[in-house]
Image (spheres, rainbow, N blue to C red):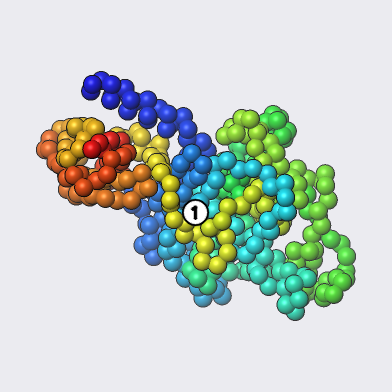
Amino acid sequence: MKKIYILFALYFHLAVAFSQGPEVTSWIVNTTGATGYNGIPSNVQQVQYSTNNVYVSATCIPGYNIGPWQGNPNTPTNQNFVYKITRNPVQNTSTPTNVGLGHIGVWTNGVSIYNVSDGMSYNNQGVWNRNAYFWEGASFDSCLGHPAPNGEYHHHVSPACLYDENDSNALSPIIGYAFDGFPVYGAYGYTNVNGTGPIKKMKSSYVLSTATTRVNGPAVNATYPAGCFMEDYNYSAGTGDLDQRNGRFCVTPEYPAGIYAYFATIDAPLTPSFPYTFYKTYYGVVQTGNTGPGSGHNAISEPVIIYTSIHEQEQKIDVDIFPNPASNYLTLYVQPGFQNNIKATLINALGQELRSQKNIQPAIQYSFDITDLPQGIYFLKLETNGVSSMKKVVVTK
């Protein structure tokens, strides 16, 4: 019987590994307890996934150094976000959803993506909408981000410190996901949409207007130069590589069958190129819970698996758990030779912590009382100094 359960566990872990797509594996998961600005835990804290969704828990604080923000009185704070990203994005064939204000997606380090606008317009008429890069750029730090009044650190433009923007010979990685579930790539892609040809910088198809007047707006002058408003740019199909949303359908290493993808565009001297990220409307269907006031704090109401990053997978904690299946007590035994002071946490299928025990030492047996737990699937997570393991536990009654 024990051999049967071992084989089942092996099959389970292989099935999980094969089901992990880029929407699960692309995140920069903090496995060491590292902190960023003001001692706040940095990057993504945890990734959980089901068949249909990925849940990204993040503080909205990056692992790179941020600040100062000239003329910006705001201070980054821990946002405790839980973003929900669909694993099955589909094109919206109905009325497109507008890309609104606030967070519109999330970078792979858990920092928020904001759109091109600073939320203001000329004379508050909503006709000539202000370009955040022009009006707020002076307050951006060296990584081209800044905090909002609510303490939410974010990037309106390509995040300069998230990946190597200078490497024009390398295909850019996925650097984020929009809230319709489609990926956001860095500036460099294949020349051809079928995934062939030289690597090139993806060019926006928006062209700066040469007009000197604006209907129902200010004249182009030193105070309101060309480019300070979003409407100063006109979409001109075929002038660049990307469509009106700053994306295209293409083959990538992560999506060999092809995917619609947005790109974070930069120009020749590596400065942000309008519209910077995805623009105006989402290509796909947007799930609820991520957009609008107070959003980004999704409850998880379905069975999920906690993603173990590649770094964690390379350094497994060698532990035996028995009996498994178990009914009343679950015993764990860490093999001799591993480091001390391990934390063990029993988690249900929703990712909720049910039992926790600290300072577990190798070569000693420890037990969890599970007599009150209902029948089902659970997970035992062991972690210490950035190393962790996850074991499946079956409870029977």
**Above or below — where is 339 with respect to 161?**
above
- Quarter containing the N terminus: top left
> Which residue lies most toward the bottom here?
123
Which residue in the protein does label 1 denote?
83
**Quarter placement of the C terminus:** top left
> Which of the 4 quarters of the picture holds residue 293?
bottom right
Q: Residue furthest front?
A: 397
Q: Residue at x 41, y 55 (%)?
A: 42
**Residue located at (66% from left, 70% from top):** 119
Q: Looking at this rendering, what residue extends furthest in the left direction?
A: 364
As rendered, which of 149 and 102 lies closer to the eye?
Answer: 102
Residue placed at 43% from the left, 51% from the top? 301
Q: Secondary structure at mark 1?
A: strand
Residue 138 visible from this viewpoint? yes
Q: Nearer the viewer, residue 208 or 290?
A: 290
| In this picture, residue 389 sits left or right of residue 270 | left
Left or right of residue 236, residue 324 in this image = left
Is residue 186 visible to us here?
no
57 vs 392: above or below: below
| Whole-percent x, y for residue 213 in the image | 88, 71
Quarter where residue 248 is shown: top right
How many numbered markers are drawn?
1
Q: Position of residue 393 (x, y in %)?
A: 28, 36
**186 vs 100, nearest the viewer:** 100
Q: Residue at x 67, y 31 (%)?
A: 195
Q: Please tell me how crowded label 1 is: few (under 14), some (14-19), or many (20+) other residues with Cα within 10 Å.
A: many
Q: What amino acid type should be assigned to the residue bearing mark 1?
A: Tyr
Identify which residue, 94 or 30, lies in the foreground: 94
Residue 87 percent location from the top left of the image = 54, 42
Residue 224 lies left or right of residue 261; in this view the side is right
Q: Residue 105, position in %: x, y?
A: 57, 54
